[in-house]
DNA sequence: CTGAGTCAGGATACCGCTTTCCCGAGCGTC
DNA sequence: GACGCTCGGGAAAGCGGTATCCTGACTCAG
């Protein structure tokens, strides 16, 4: 694999010892190499097109330059935006990011963390909300403990349920704000496409939305709080089910944008127009969707910044207590909820 | 970084030699470990929660288990879809993917390849079309030659201009098909938001579209072939410029979906409705956009499959001649071009 | 009963680098 | 002018594994 040119080759070419070559190229701490020797070494390295073996360096130094990222699906704009933040922050810190994906299976997270532990990744960032599934969480927790015992550090994006540093999205606040904003636009009957029962992010959004409305005196009937997958298809199915009913709410709140999009498809399929026949809101403010027509009312979550924040958290000096970075959300009203 | 538990610890715990422990855990080739010993070793490993150091293994074995991916922007759905394909294929092959991003600066590609070379990545996949920029291409070419001299293999996604295995998207065919389809729907005056002058993918789409129309007897005036960035903003700016003119085409073809979206924004800003006032088509069929309203006419490019194909190409046995994998594209007509 | 083969463990030589540790050389000092 | 320093180069010891080589125990055949 190595273009057989090693540091020894460079040293020989330059007529110096291996140690000197290493010091010249790396600029070792508290050790100076005479200028002419350094020149010779650098010249030799350039001539031979030497490139240090990062694995060997990692091994010798006892630490790598890579950070791991765990997502559920990199093609999902939610995760890819976070990934953009992570790569940017890693880049700034001179690190590489190893991308791993569960392919939508949360139970694989623990295995991926183990994998990243083998790589001795310096830090790992786990994106995507937690589930209320003690088994899976327990697995992940041991994997993480294990990883941290080995000197790695971790940052989570989602709910602070694993005892590690976490970037917490203020889902409840966002959902409540959205509820109030919609109420303010005159809507009085609501349905929620609520995602998976156990999905904590979905749950937070769902419940905060309902509670905020309740405070305003508007109750969402249980039948209009639907569960389903956190995906496009999940939104589509739930919307279809909803529209099969005799009655119909004025607004549908899908707990994420991708689901909202699925809902849009379902509505269109059965000839229900958005927003004329029914209004629709999502959550996340996926940037690719910002300019679609009708503009989707949603709650902005600064995903790229979250990726950056998580990376910085993971890279920060280890601390004894669990650190939480809260990120605010912001309601964005668009044409999909024009009001009554 | 290492949870100090090493293979030696396991060997000691199990009361066997380092070599035996290694063989028991790895199942070395043409070498058998007696069953009871292997059990002992495995038990010791489990007890100590041993996890092999991938770096050390890579070093000893002389090859890593990582493959590199170079994208321009992972948040762009074009690249994230490809990345999904790459991770999937890598996963199947038991490899990890190291994600690197140029952050939109093509001249950084060469540097990223160098970086991946240091990591001794087994293969690298470079996503995103080439530019007609001999300097940048030359840099990249030397970086790649260098990398391959070191035993790595490479696959490119885009134009086969670098003398390496390439997954070639049939842009010209797709654009021509689109042109014919639109002509078939009765449109006779066209404008093209053509992306960067030197961007080969943009150029292929632009020129094939124009040429196909020419064959049908419809000429696009030069003033209506606009250049600009390959981004949302690029599409927006170009569309704005276009709409400032006195005259207006019946259809606007943006050479990718993200630009088309930008164009949509621009149109909406100045009060021009799509498709009532002007029709719009894109290219790529970004999956997140499949259900937006109005549905965007576009050309489907199987991005995930392309990522898979590129990975497989990069991982295939090295061959002397340059291999090209052609992937077809398919026109998808939607409401944004209802026809005249 | 002996010599030629297996067979499977253990010792050990790397892999490519970083980082002690050791040392000789040049220097300032009283 | 001998002594204690600092300075910088080189030898060598790892880092955590893998793979080669060696060796003793057994098997099997003549």
Image (spheres, coloured by chain):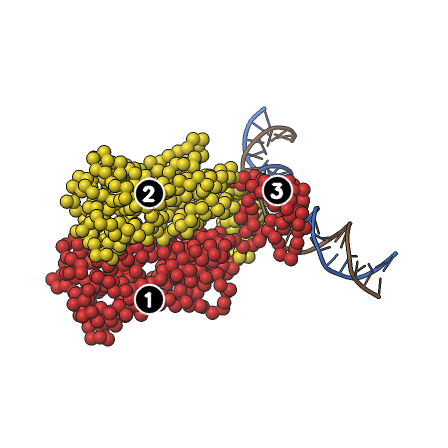
Chain colours: A red, B yellow, C brown, D blue
Q: Residue at x 41, y 43 (%)?
A: B126
Question: Which residue carries the number 3 mark?
Answer: A44
The image shows a total of numbered marks equal to 3
Q: Residue at x 55, y 46 (%)?
A: A53
- Would you say residue B241 is visible in this rendering? yes
Q: Residue at x 28, y 37 (%)?
A: B208
Say which of marks 1 and 3 sits in front. 3
- Left or right? Give the position of A34 relative to B285: right
Q: Would you call the spot at circle 1 few (<14 residues within 10 Å), some (14-19), or many (20 or more)?
A: many
Name the element at disc 1: loop
Q: Residue A265: give x, y in percent of width and height.
A: 20, 54
User: Residues at marks 2 and 3, common chain?
Assistant: no
- Please identify the quadrant where the C terminus of chain A is shown: bottom left
Checking the image for residue A329, the label placed there is 1
Label 1 vs label 3: CA separation? 54 Å
Label 2 vs label 1: CA separation? 37 Å
Q: Residue B257: give x, y in percent of width and height.
A: 28, 48
What is the chain identity of the residue bearing mark 1? A
Please identify the residue farthest to the front as the structure is shown. B246
Checking the image for residue B37, the label placed there is none
Q: Residue A331: give x, y in percent of width and height.
A: 29, 66
Task: Name the foreground residue: D22 vs A339.
Answer: A339
What is the chain identity of the residue bearing mark 2? B
Q: In the rendered structure, which disc, 1 or 3, sits on the residue that comes first in sequence?
A: 3
Q: Would you call the spot at circle 2 few (<14 residues within 10 Å), some (14-19), or many (20 or more)?
A: many
Question: Which residue carries the number 2 mark?
Answer: B202
User: Residues at marks 1 and 3, common chain?
Assistant: yes
What is the chain identity of the residue bearing mark 3? A
Residue B317 falls in which quadrant of the image?
top left
User: Residues at marks 2 and 1, common chain?
Assistant: no
- Left or right? Give the position of B322 relative to A14: left
């Amino acid at each position: 694999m190595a273009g057989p040119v090693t540091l020894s080759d460079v040293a020989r070419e330059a007529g110096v010892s291996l140690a000197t070559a290493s010091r010249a190229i790396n600029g070792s701490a508290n050790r100076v190499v005479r200028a002419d020797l350094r020149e010779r070494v650098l010249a030799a390295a350039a001539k031979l097109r030497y490139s240090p073996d990062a694995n060997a360096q990692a091994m010798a130094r006892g630490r790598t330059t890579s950070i791991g990222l765990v997502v559920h699906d990199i093609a999902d704009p939610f995760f890819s935006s976070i990934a953009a933040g992570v790569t940017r922050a890693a880049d700034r810190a001179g690190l590489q990011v190893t991308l791993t994906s569960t392919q939508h299976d949360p139970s694989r997270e623990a295995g991926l963390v183990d994998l990243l532990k083998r790589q001795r990744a310096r830090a790992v960032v786990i994106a995507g909300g937690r589930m209320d599934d003690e088994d899976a969480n327990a697995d992940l927790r041991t994997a993480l403990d294990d990883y941290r015992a080995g000197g790695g550090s971790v940052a989570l994006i989602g709910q602070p349920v694993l005892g590690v540093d976490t970037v917490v999205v203020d889902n409840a606040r966002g959902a409540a704000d959205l509820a109030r904003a919609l109420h303010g636009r005159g809507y009085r009957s609501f349905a929620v496409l609520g995602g998976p029962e156990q999905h904590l992010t979905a749950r937070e959004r769902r419940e905060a939305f309902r509670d905020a409305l309740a405070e305003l005196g508007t109750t969402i009937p249980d039948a209009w709080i639907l569960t389903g997958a956190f995906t496009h298809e999940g939104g589509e199915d739930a919307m279809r089910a909803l529209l099969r009913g005799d009655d119909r709410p004025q607004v549908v709140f899908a707990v994420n944008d991708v689901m909202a999009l699925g809902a849009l498809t379902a509505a269109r399929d059965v000839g229900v127009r958005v927003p004329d026949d029914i209004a629709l809101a999502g959550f996340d403010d996926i940037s690719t969707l910002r300019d679609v027509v009708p503009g989707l009312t949603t709650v902005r979550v600064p995903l790229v910044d979250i990726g950056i924040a998580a990376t910085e958290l993971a890279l920060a000096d280890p601390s004894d207590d669990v650190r939480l970075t809260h990120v605010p959300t912001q309601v964005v009203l668009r044409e999909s909820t024009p009001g009554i």
